[in-house]
Amino acid sequence: MSSQSKPIILLSRQEIEATVRRLAAEITKDYRNRNPVLISVLKGSFIFMADLVRLLDFPLEVDFMRLSSYGRSSRTSGKVRVVQDIGSAIKGRDIIVIEDIVDTGLTTSFLLGYLREKNPASLRLSALTEKPSRRKVSVNVDYLGFTVPDKFLVGYGLDWDEKFRYLPDICYVEVE
């Protein structure tokens, strides 16, 4: 990324808030009496997860996983590894994976397969954003916030080499 690159707003904090409320209503309708485990994929989805959980008014549990496929690059390596595993036993439980973005689908597909091996009762995916134009592996997003263009996104938890996570809007930056 050049030193002149400044984040340009793609989705405002107001648009994000309205969409998180919509997703919370959809999840509430489906899970009100089920006590699901929400698994946030760190680090990018922690803000989305926090905002979403505050809008869900039913018993639930949260857990966190950390995966890596990017390293310090702006492009995925395609090789996914578990950096931090969940601590919860999820066998027989309803699971909702909370993702910031589904891009190529490689990381998300890996994660869903990894969790399926633990035999949950159900497994669904909520993603704040997706870039279908970059999809290499088919991934079904059950609760989707936004479909976004093929831009490098930052803000609202999304980062570029740990920069820009703090921005309240979802922005894009030009990367070289």
Image (cartoon, helix red, strand yellow):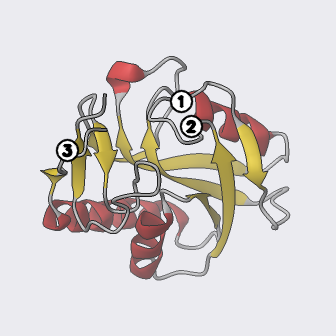
Residue at the spot 74% in from the left edge and 39% down from the top edge: 81
Relative to 48, say whether 7 is above or below. above
Check disc 1: other Cα within 10 Å, few if <14, some if 14-19, many if 20+: some
Marker disc for residue 70: 2
Chain-order first, disc 3 or disc 1:
3
Marker disc for residue 95: none
Chain-order first, disc 1 or disc 2:
2
Dot 3 corresponds to which residue?
5
Residues at circles 2 and 3 in contact by the CB criterion of under 8 Å: no
Can you see residue 28? no
Residue at the spot 43% in from the left edge and 81% down from the top edge: 54
Coordinates of residue 175 in the picture (x, y in percent): 30, 33
Residue at the spot 53% in from the left edge and 29% down from the top edge: 105
Amino acid type of disc 2?
Tyr
Check disc 3: other Cα within 10 Å, few if <14, some if 14-19, many if 20+: few
Dot 1 corresponds to which residue?
76
Check disc 2: other Cα within 10 Å, few if <14, some if 14-19, many if 20+: some
Residues at circles 1 and 2 in contact by the CB criterion of under 8 Å: yes
Label 1 residue SS: loop
Amino acid type of disc 3?
Ser
Of the two numbered discs 2 and 3 in the rendering, the one whose residue sits closer to the viewer: 3
Amino acid type of disc 1?
Thr
Residue 109, image quadrant = top right
Q: CA distance from mark 1 to mark 2?
A: 4 Å
Coordinates of residue 129 in the picture (x, y in percent): 35, 44
Residue at the top extreme? 136
